[in-house]
Image (spheres, grey):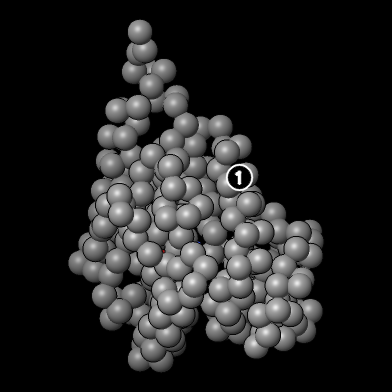
Amino acid sequence: MENGAARTAQPVIVAIDGPSGTGKSSTSKAVAAQLGLSYLDTGAQYRAITWWMVTNGIDMEDPSAIAAVAGKPEIVSGTDPAHPTITVDGVDVAGPIRTQEVTAKVSAVSAVPEVRTRITELQRSLATSAEDGIVVEGRDIGTTVLPDADLKIFLTASPEARAARRSGELKGADVHATREALIKRDAADSSRKASPLAKAGDAVEVDTTDLTLAQVIECVVTLVEEKRAAK
Ligand SMILES: Nc1ncnc2c1ncn2[C@@H]1O[C@H](COP(=O)(O)OP(=O)(O)O)[C@@H](O)[C@H]1O
Ligand SMILES: Nc1ccn([C@@H]2O[C@H](COP(=O)(O)OP(=O)(O)O)[C@@H](O)[C@H]2O)c(=O)n1
């Protein structure tokens, strides 16, 4: 018969999706660190391939040009929640992938099916090789990348709260402009044909508008522990 320790040792796969600024990265990193799981920021992977396309002068208006080179860059993600890393062809791109230029172009690149196929393969392989389990955050993790995840969470928050959080990070950025840019990116991500931003039917929705980050983390940790105990 299994005891409690054996049950807690079972790997657990957690999918956290939602629009920009809902708290996916902060929550996922903290939950993974607290529970001893790996952590994968899939948005960083899409940003990394976009950075490579920008750096190599690929025409962002031309999906076939993007598709033709989708297999070229080698993207490597480090999954330690205390020190997540991302490199492209061996170059550390953690900083460059957060520029406004990359942010403005990432939706066009991530809408290209050849890009999604490539990045989805990387994500599944990292999830499979995480010994103790993993928290994977993004837009289509619960619906497409890991449809058999043990737990699926869909984070939401009002556009106002999300814009205020993001402009706080961007040191003095205009909240109105940030809000418009977020809404535009959400619309593009939700309306694309290939694997759009969507809540999985079996995901637990958590509205973080009036919650502190600590409250969201506690809520998700409790949900993961319940799943682990039931395994
Ligand atoms: N519940 C919350 N209340 C207040 N600020 C939050 C909350 N969740 C996240 N934040 C802050 O909002 C910003 C965006 O969070 P992040 O985790 O990067 O969101 P996402 O990954 O969904 O885009 C960060 O500065 C983070 O510290
Ligand atoms: N699973 C995912 C994750 C991100 N993305 C794309 O990558 C972009 C950047 O994701 P992100 O998580 O870094 O965005 P922020 O929440 O940090 O603003 C999104 O706007 C999507 O276009 C995606 O298509 N699928």
Label 1's element? helix
Expressed as whole percent of the image width and height from the top left, the position of residue 122 reads: 64, 52
For the residue pair 62 and 229, the one nearer the viewer reads as 62
Q: Which residue is drawn at 32% across and 43% down?
A: 221
- The quarter holding residue 48 reads bottom right
Provide residue 172's location: percent of width, then percent of height.
Answer: 43, 86
Q: Is residue 46 left or right of residue 178?
A: right
Give residue 97's position: percent from left, percent from top.
62, 72
Give the quadrant of the C terminus.
Answer: top left
According to the picture, the residue beneath numbered tag 1 turns out to be 126
Q: Is 60 situated above or below 67? A: below
Q: Is residue 225 left or right of residue 56?
A: left
Q: Can residue 176 be seen in this view?
A: yes
The residue that appears at 74% across and 80% down in the rendered structure is 65
Q: Looking at the rendering, which quadrant does residue 21 occupy?
A: bottom left
- Position of 175 compared to 222: left or right? right
Give percent across and percent down for residue 3.
35, 13
Above or below, comparing residue 200 to residue 54 in the picture: above
Task: For residue 137, say whether it is visible.
Answer: no
Type of amino acid at the residue the image marks with label 1: Leu
Q: Residue at x 43, y 77 (%)?
A: 191
Name the residue: 53% across, 57% down. 41
Reply above or below: 228 against 91.
above
Of residues 122 and 44, which is closer to you in this image?
122
